[in-house]
Amino acid sequence: MPQLELKSLVVKLEALKAKKLKQLQEGLVDAGEALKALSQDIVPVDTGLMKASATVRQEFNDPAKPTVAVVYTAPYSLYVHEALWMNHPRGGEAKFLERPLRENEDILTEIILEKVSKN
């Protein structure tokens, strides 16, 4: 009988693990969307192409390690992000993803934890 109880416990733990991984993925997506919104406030704009290219992508390389990427897909986005010396006459600044991530780390973490802590 104890072996059956152990198998039942393992089944329940696996179900809980799957549920929490799903919640983690959802929390990462929500935090990614929040980061994207924050970055939109300071992304440099010339034609609007780069700003419009912002997206939140779910990465499914390893189901046990949920991952989300917030990216700007315009070909020059990385250059503009890293070019601290560039002038942006219409507003915006370099590090338009990195700065909001650093400045809002606690808020973004809370978004994730809120999702994961649900029953």
Image (cartoon, rainbow, N blue to C red):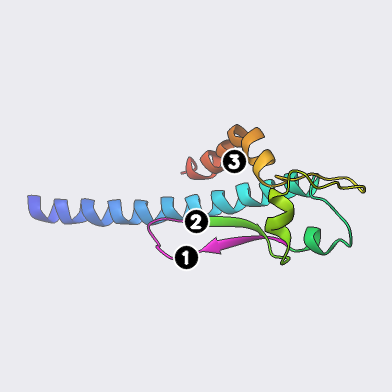
Reading the image, the residue beneath label 3 is 111
Q: Quadrant of residue 41?
A: top right
Answer few, some or many: residues within 10 Å of disc 3's Cα (few below 14, many 20 plus, some between 14 and 19).
Answer: some
**Disc 1 marks which residue?**
60
Three-letter code for the amino acid on which mark 1 is drawn? Phe
Residue 2 lies in the magenta stretch: no
Classed neighbour count for the residue bearing mark 1: other residues with Cα under 10 Å, few (<14), some (14–19), many (≥20): few
Q: Which residues are magenta?
A: 54-67
Residue sitting at 59 percent across and 41 percent down? Answer: 111
Q: Which of marks 2 and 1 precedes in the sequence?
A: 1
Q: Which residue is mark 2?
A: 67
Whether residues under marks 1 and 2 lie with C-beta atoms below 8 angstroms apart, the answer is yes
Q: Position of residue 45 (x, y in %)?
A: 86, 54
Q: Residue at x 85, y 46 (%)?
A: 87
Would you say 92 lies left or right of 60 here? right
* Residue at (74, 45) in percent of width and height: 94
| Residue 12: % across, % down | 29, 53
Disc with the residue nearer the chain's start (1 vs 3): 1
Q: Nearer the viewer, mark 1 or mark 3?
A: 1
